[in-house]
Amino acid sequence: MIIKKFQANNETDAIILAKEELGKDAIVMNIKTISPKGIYKLFKKPLVEVTAAIDDNITYKNDKEPLVKKQNFPDIIYDDPQDDKENEPVKTKASAIEEKLNNLQSLLEKQMEEKVDNKKANQKSKAVNKNLACIQLIYNQLILNEVDEKFANQIISEIEGTLKRDSSMDNILSSVYQKIVLKLGQPKTISLDGNTPKFVFFIGPTGVGKTTTIAKIASKFKVEEKAKVAFVTSDTYRIAAVEQLRTYANILGIPMKVVYNEDDLVNTRKDFEDFDIVFVDTAGRSHKNKNQRDDIENLINIIPESEREIYLVLSATTKYRDLITITEAYSEITNYNLIFTKLDETSTVGNIFNIRMFTNAPLSYATFGQDVPDDIERIDAQSIAKQLLRGQ
């Protein structure tokens, strides 16, 4: 079999060239337009390329030229109306050749399609593998910063469906960052909303820094907002706690009351009815002791819900498993907002994210030292997200 390509200014001329060189039984396999590339397209016209083939083993009974030419160019077979019977074997053989060539062309086209599909599949696979590699790095970083595996997997699964096939590392990182910020939410901080006096209770385990945290927040209201502030403490189990709060009260010029039971708080509420905000320091009771938890719950319930806010104070250095136990115990008492202390004593902030996800309680403040009133600020979701995604 002989297969050749012929180029001309138009389709008819190209087929005539094929006929002249290969003979009347040439089969057109393909016709396409070839456009000049680059700067040449400004000066040259497109050409038509015909791919034709002929079986080099064909023999003929005579050399008669065709009298009628078919207009179906892709199928160059000629009929002689004066001698159909004589040319019938030639036509039959030409049809067989055409069928073989058509089958060959179909096979070649199929192979080309498979190559293109395989190339696309390989490109897609490479893009997917690149995405997976980036995602794995980010996942490992979250785990390194002590984000719980459950929540890390949740973040990854939520962003995977939004990624393009070949996303850059920056785009993937940005998607995870935004997802973390959204999950952390806006901080819920103390404000004066007109319902005065507002009683703000601080609850939590012993040793987490409740008293110092109260002093930091109270001083800002006293100095920056010129609010009328008072202190109450029910932490009569530790003499040092009462004296510590009294010291802060004296420095800030703030009145302070010690309450031993619910009746004392009822009377204190009357005493401070002209104040803007009253900060209540509760005892650091064991979250495992139900009776002690009941004491705190009874004290809180003295104040109507519309006039109180509750803040659970936790140390960022506490083990995640213990934080789960603590938050579950206090959830039985009341709804609360979250304050994290001692950020200066830990290198990771994964637990802040974990507990926010576990409790769905709003974040509020974070403290990072003992200086009053400086070492406290609203929890910044963007800052936390950056810390979770960067190295130690």
Image (tube, rainbow, N blue to C red):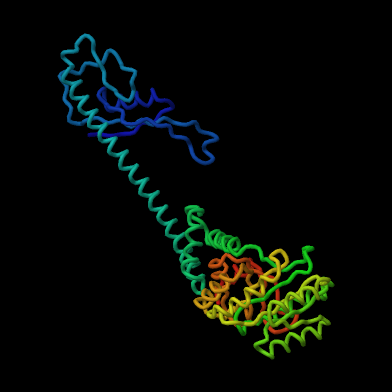
Compared with 237, 22 (above or below) is above
* Residue at x-position 64% and y-position 74%: 298
Residue 250 placement, left or right of 41: right
Q: Quadrant of the C terminus?
A: bottom right
Compared with 166, 112 (above or below) is above
Compared with 132, 205 (above or below) is below
Pick the front one: 365 or 90: 365
Image coordinates for residue 118, horizontal then vertical, percent: 35, 49
Which image quarter: residue 389? bottom right
* Residue at x-position 37% and y-position 26%: 14
Residue 154 placement, left or right of 295: left
Pick the front one: 138 or 380: 380
Pick the front one: 183 or 206: 206
Image coordinates for residue 74, horizontal then vertical, percent: 32, 25
Pick the front one: 345 or 285: 285
Count of all numbered marks drawn on residues in the image? 0
Residue 58 placement, left or right of 312: left
What is the residue that sits farthest to the bottom in this orientation? 239
Image coordinates for residue 116, horizontal then vertical, percent: 37, 45
What is the residue that sits farthest to the front in this orientation? 263
Residue 257 placement, left or right of 167: right
Which image quarter: residue 311? bottom right
Q: Quadrant of the N terminus?
A: top left
* Residue at x-position 26% and y-position 21%: 77
